[in-house]
């Protein structure tokens, strides 16, 4: 789960990390008061969406009067911001962050991830900030440091000093960073983060370290023990069908093609998409109905798939492991009837009681292409699409 | 021979009395697996599936002397259950549960490594040695004793590989699902070592998927350390970047972990690639018979 910048900064503030004073608004008329609350005569105003590249897309501006804040809010609230990280539809802007202006002397980069290779939380820092870190790592690897944290000891001061050297910090800033690092580590652990990125972390003209941005991802597996963070979930930033699927405990990702896929198991679901492509077709979605493909779940899955107007045919691929294929066949039939499926349906059943399942489908009133061979089923689906 | 489990493996099931554990334990027992009891805190002293239930692993170890633990407890409690099993002195732990928080696994993995305990999973179908023992949720009927060792990050995709090798009469020595999470207890390399040493395994099928770099690391290992032929299929060739494809670990992040990169690396290291999942069985037969 992703957080908005303003939510990330709220967490930063709780962990005593240096962030700008700011206000979040969701109505244009609140912009003037927000500017007055913050004070000063220069502000940064930022559209809040779950995507990077906002600045280049016009979603971040420097403003000199509260009226400009109102104008910006009127321009963006309720609209969709398209950046190089979003799709062509962009992301809905439902809130805007107004902040005091920070005078920047130097931009740095800092992030923390769970590194799968070393199985540790690793901090990544660079003296080059505000840019794509992968590019820096490729072109000037000496400017990037990776510091791995032992889960039992946590982040130690010597590690902060080590990173400070690479960042080129002076004595005062090194002291500041020695507080920032353990605080970020505590935030990472306590809130079950999977990614934390501050790009840029800046040195202000006053010589102090300051977090100018906040990108945070939370481990979805740990949301159950993070009730406060669960409240921060913003479904408006997700694909409508994907969030509908999540509500029903189905794993769904929408794609560009026209062959709807319903599969049990994530690996097989990907394998099925690949097979469709292999035979020249294009999958409309990834969908894992899970190990227990009951009638109820199958019906919900059909509804989701058919909500996509591009879908011309549905391919159901079930490997009946523990579940019996005859029960699945009955579930598929009942679901088709319940949902009123009008596009052709190709079903491949394999495994436990597959023959009995195919028989049930063959004798059904609705027309279903039932094949117990994935190759033939995928070919058929591609042909019908 | 086989790897990790056989007919002599004495299995204790943690979370024994839960509905999933009951269903799958019964199937394992029917398959011939030697399940010697279970652990469910608060239910010690009861009899479940004709086997004793204990409150703690310590009591189970004293009473029924298991050497493998099979875990079905809900995700929030897996850290506790895995650590309890590891500290009890058991040699092998298999955690089936999906949805364990990654930070829990970070600590658990470090501890089981320190203790020298082998952990398989979480978020996996388990292990089966056909005809001998089934510690997991895979359908026993599609397996057949034979010569192919199968390792996979996915459940149902493993079943495809199993079915195809059974249909072609090759059969399997053992099949291991290492799970689809970012921090698995055992890696491809850990299991490749075991199959390389197993006399009954003539070829190894490695089913990978997008995300992380476990397949690339395995490729390097295969090049230098594995003498047996390896056949690999990588799922997710059509997966978009930045989206989690069901499994927590199946995500292309920062342009890394694509199927194309993995396939390229595996090919470079001499691994036989099944381009499509339909070809896993035939490719394996071709390699074995050549």
Image (cartoon, rainbow, N blue to C red):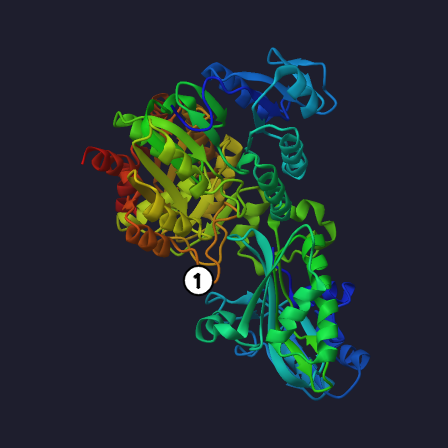
Residue A333 locus on image (x, y percent): 42, 30
Q: Is residue B19 visible?
A: yes
Residue A179 lies left or right of residue A278; in this view the side is right
Q: How many marks?
A: 1
The relative height of residue B127 versus residue B268 in the rendered view (above or below) is above
Q: Is residue B233 left or right of residue A58?
A: left
Image vertical order of residue A192 relative to residue A100, above or below:
above
Foreground residue, A274 or A13? A13
| The N terminus of chain A sits in image quarter | bottom right
Query: Which residue is at a point 62% across and 28% down the rendered structure image?
Result: B89
Nearest the eye: B159 or B122: B122
Residue A58 screen position, x and y as percent: 56, 79
Q: Residues within 10 Å of mark 1 (few under 14, many from 20)?
A: few
**Residue B257: x %, y % from top left:** 43, 55
Q: Chain under label 1?
A: B
Element assignment for label 1:
loop
Q: Position of residue B6 (x, y in %)?
A: 45, 21
**Residue B226, placed above or below residue B13:** below
Residue at 41 percent across and 47 percent down: it is: B209
Asked whether A49 or A365 is in front, the reply is A49
Can residue A259 be spotted in the picture?
A: no
- In the rendered structure, the answer to whether residue B88 lies left or right of residue A356 reads right
> Which of the 4 image quarters holds residue B167?
top left
> Does A247 sit above or below residue A136?
above
For disc 1, the marked residue is B255
């Amino acid at each position: 789960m992703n957080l908005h910048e303003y939510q990330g900064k709220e967490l930063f503030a709780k962990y005593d990390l240096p962030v700008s004073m700011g206000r979040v608004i969701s109505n244009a008329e609140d912009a003037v008061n927000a500017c007055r609350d913050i004070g000063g005569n220069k502000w940064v105003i930022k559209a809040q969406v779950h995507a990077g590249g906002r600045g280049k897309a016009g979603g971040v501006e420097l403003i000199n009067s509260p009226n400009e804040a109102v104008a910006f809010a009127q321009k963006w609230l309720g609209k969709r911001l398209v950046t190089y990280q979003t799709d062509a539809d962009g992301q809905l802007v439902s809130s805007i962050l107004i902040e005091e202006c920070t005078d920047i002397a130097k931009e740095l980069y800092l992030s923390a991830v769970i590194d799968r290779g070393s199985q540790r939380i690793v901090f990544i820092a660079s003296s080059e900030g505000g840019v794509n870190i992968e590019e820096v790592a490729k072109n000037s690897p000496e400017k990037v440091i990776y510091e791995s944290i032992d889960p039992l000891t946590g982040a130690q001061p010597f590690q902060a000093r080590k990173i400070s050297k690479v960042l080129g910090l002076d004595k005062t800033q090194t002291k500041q960073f020695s507080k920032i690092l353990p605080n970020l580590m505590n935030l990472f652990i306590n809130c079950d983060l999977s990614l934390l990125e501050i790009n840029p972390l800046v040195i202000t003209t006053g010589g102090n370290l300051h977090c100018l941005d906040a990108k945070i991802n939370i481990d979805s597996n740990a949301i159950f023990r993070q009730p406060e963070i669960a409240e921060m979930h913003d479904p408006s930033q997700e694909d409508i069908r994907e969030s509908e699927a999540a509500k029903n405990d189905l794993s769904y990702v929408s794609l560009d093609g026209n062959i709807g896929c319903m599969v049990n198991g994530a690996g097989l679901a990907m394998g099925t998409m690949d097979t469709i492509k292999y035979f020249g077709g294009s999958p409309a979605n990834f969908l894992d109905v899970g190990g227990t493909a009951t009638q109820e779940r199958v019906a919900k899955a059909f509804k989701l798939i058919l909500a996509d107007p591009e879908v011309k045919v549905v391919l159901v691929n079930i490997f009946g492991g523990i579940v019996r294929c005859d029960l699945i066949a009955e579930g598929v039939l009942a679901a088709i009837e319940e949902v009123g499926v009008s596009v052709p349906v190709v079903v491949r059943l394999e495994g436990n009681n597959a023959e009995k399942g195919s028989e049930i489908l063959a004798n059904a009133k609705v027309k279903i292409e039932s094949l117990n061979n994935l190759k033939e089923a995928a070919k058929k689906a591609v042909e019908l699409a | 021979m086989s790897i990790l489990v056989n007919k002599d493996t004495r299995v204790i099931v943690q979370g024994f009395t839960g509905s999933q554990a009951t269903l799958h334990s019964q199937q394992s027992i029917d398959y011939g697996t030697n399940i010697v009891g279970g652990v469910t805190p608060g239910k010690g002293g009861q009899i479940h599936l004709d086997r004793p239930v204990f409150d703690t692993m310590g009591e189970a170890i004293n009473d029924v002397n298991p050497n493998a633990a099979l875990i079905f407890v809900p995700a929030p409690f897996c850290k506790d259950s895995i650590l309890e099993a590891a500290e009890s002195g058991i040699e092998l732990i298999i955690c089936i549960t999906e949805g364990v928080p990654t930070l829990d696994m970070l600590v658990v993995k470090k501890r089981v490594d320190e203790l020298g305990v082998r952990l398989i999973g979480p978020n996996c179908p388990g292990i089966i040695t056909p005809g001998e023992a089934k510690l997991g949720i895979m359908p026993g009927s599609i397996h057949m004793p034979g010569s192919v060792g199968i390792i996979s990050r996915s459940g149902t995709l493993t079943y495809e590989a199993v079915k195809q090798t059974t249909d072609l009469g090759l059969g399997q020595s053992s099949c291991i699902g290492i799970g689809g999470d970012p921090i698995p207890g055992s890696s491809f390399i850990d299991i490749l070592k075991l199959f390389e040493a197993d006399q009954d395994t003539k070829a190894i099928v490695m089913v990978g998927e997008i995300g992380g770099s476990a397949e690339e690391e395995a490729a390097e290992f295969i090049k230098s350390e594995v003498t047996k032929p390896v056949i690999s299929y990588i799922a997710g060739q059509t997966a978009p970047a930045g989206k989690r494809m069901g499994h927590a670990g199946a995500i292309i992040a920062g342009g890394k972990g694509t199927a194309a990169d993995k396939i390229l690396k595996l090919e470079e290291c001499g691994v036989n690639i099944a381009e499509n999942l339909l070809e896993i069985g035939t490719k394996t037969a071709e390699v074995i018979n050549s």
